[in-house]
Amino acid sequence: MANRTERHGVPWEESYGYVQAVQRGDTIYISGQLAHDGDRLVAPAPVVNGVITDFSNMGEQLRRSYANAAELLGRFGASLDDVVEEVVYALDCDALFAVAGPVRKEAYGRPDPQVASTMLATPRLAFPEQLVEVKFTARV
């Protein structure tokens, strides 16, 4: 069974060596999505001497991460309705928890998203200004 893949066309796909999404059979695996518009980071967190000084862009970064995932899923004829599992990686779980409920409910279009979800704290993500990243698995 052949894999079907999709990319965003951002420079880090080539430099790191990966695709954004892989469909194998009825399952779509979405790589960790971050808040970007092309190769520009959306709502970057302020960083001073290598330390993030403000986490208030967490909601905006999370919202864009869901939008980027939805765009990828659409290329497979799927949507966030087909997501069965997500893993949310954040630099600050308190900041994430403060905004995640409304953002997730908006993204999934319902007050009770029907998706298994795990939230993890991590000391660092791919970009210094990045606050959050979300990985998805969908079934179609």
Image: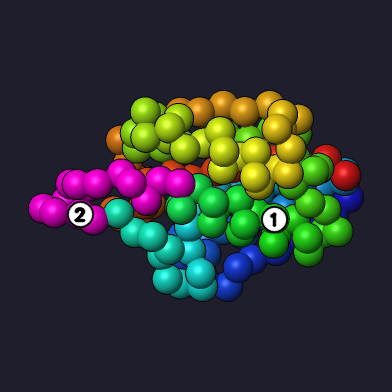
User: What residue appears at the point 48 percent right and 64 percent down from the top-left corner?
Assistant: 36
> Badge 2 is on which residue?
47
Looking at this view, is 120 or 59 the one in front? 59
Residue 8 position by quadrant: bottom right
Residue span colored magenta: 46-59
Count of labels shown?
2
Residue 2 drawn at (x, y percent)? 84, 55
Give the residue displayed 72% in from the left and 29% down from the top: 112
The figure's colour scheme reads rainbow
Query: Which x, y percent locates residue 64?
Result: 54, 56
Indicate yes or no whether the magenta region holds residue 133. no
* Label 2 CA crowd tier, 10 Å (few <14, some 14–19, many 20+): few
Vertical placement of residue 2 versus 54, above or below: below
Taking 110 as reference, is 48 left or right? left
What residue is drawn where x is 66% and y is 47%?
Answer: 107
Q: Which quadrant would residue 21 be assigned to in this image? A: bottom right
Q: Is residue 114 left or right of residue 95?
A: right
Q: Secondary structure at mark 1?
A: helix
| Residue at the spot of label 1 | 70
Residue 83 appears in the rendering: yes
Q: Give the mark nearest the N terminus, 2 or 1.
A: 2
Between 65 and 127, the one nearer to me in the picture: 65
In the displayed structure, does residue 17 sit left or right of residue 116?
left
87 sits to left or right of 122: right
| Amino acid type at mark 1 | Ala
